[in-house]
Amino acid sequence: MKSIYPDIATLLLELEAELRVLSLWDAEPPSPAALASTEPFCVDTLTLPQWLQFVFLPRMSQMVELEIPLPHACGIAPMAEEFFRGSELPVAALTRKLEEIDTRLARG
């Protein structure tokens, strides 16, 4: 059986690239207090792009690097669809990338 880790590593790099293309990549991290939120996706302190950059990508990258068991479900794509609803940003590629991550994790 093929390891999931190389696939997820590639998808994470592609996700970062999409965030950068859309100018959703922040140069400065949020405050430690904002990152300490206990709400799902840090919805009370971060935007979804910030959560992806400063929480999801680092955590998932570390899990891939250390080959820690990955979650079987994330459900990030629906969150992104809701977050970007009505936005004029061309986020279709970003949403597709999140769907790919969700699907690959679900397949294991």
Image: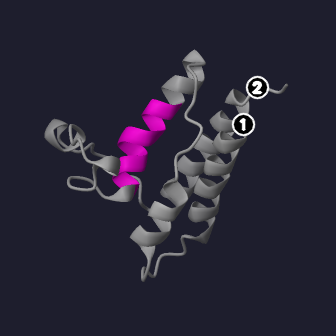
Q: Main secondary structure of the magenta part?
A: helix
Q: Is residue 57 magenta?
A: yes
Q: Which mark is residue 3?
A: 2
CB contact under 8 Å: marks 2 and 1? yes
Q: Is residue 58 above or below residue 100?
A: above
Point out the residue furthest to the top here.
Answer: 66
Say which element carries label 2: loop
Question: Which image quadrant is residue 95 in?
Answer: bottom right
Q: Residue, x 41% and y 45% (percent of image)? A: 53
Q: Residue, x 42% and y 79% (percent of image)? A: 87
Amino acid tagged 1: Asp
- Report the side of 47 relative to 14 (left or right): left
Residue 52 in the image, given as x and y percentages of width and height = 42, 48
Amino acid tagged 2: Ser
- Report the side of 47 relative to 53 (left or right): left
Q: Is residue 10 magenta?
A: no
The crowding category of the residue bearing disc 1, from other C-alpha atoms within 10 Å (few below 14, some 14 to 19, many at least 20), is: some
What is the distance, in whole Å, between disc 2 and disc 1 at their CAs? 8 Å
- The magenta-colored residue range is 49-60
- Report the side of 1 relative to 50 (left or right): right
98 or 102: nearer the viewer: 102
Point out the residue furthest to the left here.
Answer: 33
63 or 9: nearer the viewer: 63
In the picture of the structure, the residue carrying the numbered disc 1 is 7
Q: Is residue 38 above or below residue 20?
A: above
77 or 12: nearer the viewer: 77
The quadrant of the image that shows the N terminus is top right
The crowding category of the residue bearing disc 2, from other C-alpha atoms within 10 Å (few below 14, some 14 to 19, many at least 20), is: few
